[in-house]
Amino acid sequence: MTDILIQKRIPVIPRMVKGRFRRIKYVILFVAYAIYFMLPWLRWERDNGPAQAVLFDIASRKFYLFDLTVYAQDIFWLAGLLVIAAFLLFFVTGIAGRVFCGYFCFQTLWTDVFVLIERLVQGERNARIKLINGPNTAEKILKLTTTKFLWLLMSFFTGLAFTAYWADSFELTKLFFTGQAPFPAYATTLFLMVTTFVMAGLAREQVCTYMCPYSRFQAVMFDDDTLIVVYDEQRGEGENGRIKPSRDLSVKEEREHQGYGDCIDCGYCVQVCPTGIDIRNGMQYECISCALCIDACDTIMDSIKYPRGLVRYSSEHELHGSPRRWYKLKNLGYSVSILLVTGLLVWSIMTRSLTELTVNQVRQPLSVTLSDGRVQNRFELKVVNKSDHTQSYQISLEGIEQAELDMGHFAEFTLRSGDSVKLQVAIKHTRLNHEGQRIDFMFVVQSLNTKDIPIIRHKAVFNQP
């Protein structure tokens, strides 16, 4: 019987590093957190509707995005956004590798903050390793408990901020802390709190290594021109490999003379890696292209007066002396697809109808012969006011002469922004000579308030007995 060996997880405790890529990550982190946590609280005045800039109102089946109101009927816009996101991910990955993972992924952004909290409470990498491996003293228990408490606090606010997108943020928060909020608010906040704590605090690099499917299929989008984080093995290893500096091997020229490379085997690049890999072992699927190892290596190279670039962003072609090719057929295809779908989505939003008309014919019975000999068809009309203002409407007919439109008491009607109405209408028409003849006509809905809203026409059929 074959023994199955399971290695216990070795926790990755990354070291702090300074550099240009770390600064870029801090800027992106600040902007991303500012948008995520502050957007639900941003006020946005509307004539009719909630005064919240971004609100996903599930109960009313409306999404409010600043001046844009998205209705349930506009769900195909979401499909357009997903297509754009997919093509953009393929395009960026083909050109620049996993930069999305290293700079913009939620897992990376939240893990960065959790590591900062851990470093603030427990100290730098060596102090944290010593603390974990040390005995269970009062200091250790206090620091670990404080770290977990701050993680939970950060996770709670993450969940609460997410929940605030789905209701009026100020009112929801008031109800939340007084115990009067609806159950889904507590359930959603708790779910996001637990998942954030586990993913960013406990699992960390295991999410990228084992759970994220992107790390598994990313290689199919790579080629020899894809920009990746690489270790210049020829320069770093030389003929006799890398070696730590000594009195006789501290000068670059002397190291080259003895056949040693520029890598001094300090291990700084490994210590700062959030997934715990050694970039000197070549490209690995765990690498998220965060470039922190580049900052680490550049820091060491600057300190010993060696040129930068031993670890850098490059491609396989550039690494072997060939120029990098940017203009490739797949990149062109991705970019054209992104521009095309984006253009169609913007056009659809800009030309959206501010009035929606739905017509359904009542088919039981399909037609009725009245006592005066005329034929009657009944229809159910649904009118939705998708504009930002209250509108008064009038319905008329086109293409069916001498027909009478019977709307009961609704010759005209008024709808507030976002409201809808269902009308039962009857059309009465003189019986034609040919049995079963159908007449095509149009229902016409016209706003009486403003000429900026186009007239809406919907095709329908009048049926003879």
Image (cartoon, rainbow, N blue to C red):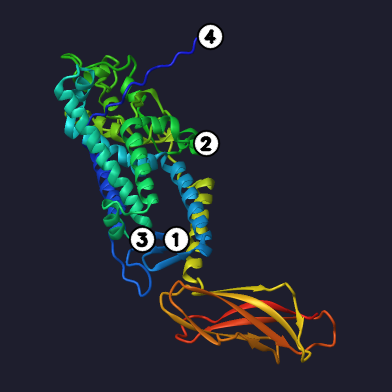
When the figure is inspected, residue 4 is found, relative to residue 282, above or below; the finding is above
**Whole-percent x and y of residue 104?**
35, 44
Q: Nearer the viewer, mark 4 or mark 1?
A: 1
Which secondary structure lies at badge 2?
Answer: helix
Residue to which mark 3 is pinned: 54
- Give the label, 2 or 4, closer to the camera: 4
Label 4: few (<14), some (14–19) or many (≥20) C-alpha neighbours in 10 Å: few
SS assignment at label 3: strand
Tell me which amino acid carries mark 3: Val
Which amino acid type corresponds to the residue marked 2 in the rendered image? Val
**Disc number for residue 2:** 4
The CA span between labels 4 and 1 is 56 Å
Pointer 2 residue? 220
Q: CA distance from mark 3 to mark 4?
A: 57 Å
Give the residue number, with chain letter if any, for mark 1. 59
Circle nearer the N terminus (3, 4) = 4
